[in-house]
Image (cartoon, rainbow, N blue to C red):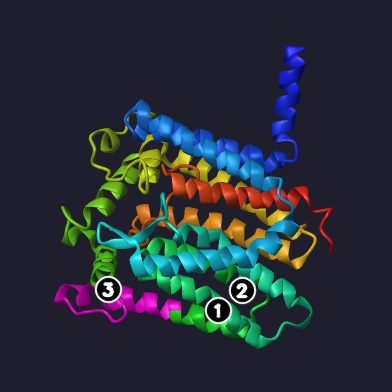
Amino acid sequence: MEKRSLIKRIRFLWAGLDPNLSFILLALIVVGNVTFLSASSGTVITWVEQLRNLMIAFIIMWFTSRVPVKWLEKASVWIYSIGLGLLIAVALFGLIKKGARRWLNIGMVIQPSEIMKIAMPMMLSWYFYKREENTKLWDFGVAFLFLLLPTILIARQPDLGTAILVFAAGFYVIILAGLPWKFILPFIGLGVIGILLIVIFGDTICAKGVTWPILKSYQQHRVCTLLDPTTDPLGKGFHTIQSMIAIGSGGLLGKGWLKGTQTHLDFIPEKHTDFIFAVYSEEFGLVGNFVLLILFLLLIQRGLKIAASAPNLYTRLLGGSVTLIFFTYAFVNMAMVSGLLPVVGVPLPFISYGGTALTTLGLGVGILMSIHRHRRLVQT
């Protein structure tokens, strides 16, 4: 009887969860924990804290998967409005830590910018869903206003990494909603031109100490470090140089678990958070990186498939944008650690240590689970 009762509890726990998405998520968590044990140098307390964070993320995912998407739709405006109000409150009287005003004390310390990673795509998905039958060009302009306001508030904290993720989450919705290519291509063209100008003239500008327009001093230093980290090898370029050495020294098969010299001699900074990919690359090599990329691609493929089979525009836009958020997390982190992008605070999904980020990711997976579970119950 006890065995039957236990089996029933396990079945109830997993009932309604998409098995494919659950398996991919479990594989990423296993890889993450194995890497984290090495990155934390076997510190049990830190590993237990990570397990606690994962458990909280799982609970949030489980409960969210059981929330009808109709409820998510109705709550979209409220969640966005509350998140925006909290961001304004942070700008007025938020807590300052390490020169950044990102936190708010409401009896407990919270970081409201994390809310917008999910609130933004929910809001814009709701907006376009309500205008599905008569979407006009100016609707995309209004959507950009909804997007830019919290993005600017977050960037001014300053928190460039979160601002990028929030902007990307909303921009994905706008593109998926049907923004004409004649408006997308100019942005792509400007981006390409900007990159070319930085590559061609960046070293000269950095060497002469010329102030870059728009960018703050610390952001300019990040770009200059990206172009040539050896100009400050023991300072701002230290992170990039050491992570690139770790990745390159991993070779084809890696040095083996717990045998990474860059890791265990403490050359890799932030090795259990933003730079954990360098730890993984050193110990598992190119083959390990290939496996990790396959897992992330499977996660993205499954999320997009759930979004494509969703029954209405709201769930399709929300599912697609949430899935592409996972892509943005993984791409930005891996490119940052590999020296292809400036260093910004973006963790590797389900691998890096962190409570807030894992909570957001768990909420995102829960939304995908809910869309899949209730796909036959949503009115088309």
Q: Is residue 200 above or below residue 93?
A: below
The residue carrying mark 3 is: 216
First in sequence: mark 3 or mark 2?
A: 2
The answer to which quarter of the image holds residue 313 is bottom right
Left or right, residue 112 beside residue 6: left
Whether tag 3 and tag 2 are in contact, CB under 8 A, the answer is no
The residue shown at (32%, 63%) is 101
Q: Would residue 53 be found to the left or right of residue 103 on screen?
A: right
Give SS at disc 3. loop
Task: Report the magenta residues as a range.
Answer: 191-216
Residue 127 spot, x, y in % from top left: 67, 73
Looking at the image, is 250 positioned above or below residue 5? below
- Tag 2's secondary structure? helix
In reply to whether residue 192 is colored magenta, the answer given is yes
Pointer 2 residue = 174
Tag 3: amino acid: Lys
**98 up-or-down from 282: above or below:** below
Quadrant in which the N terminus appears = top right
Badge 1 element: helix
Foreground residue among 9 and 380:
9
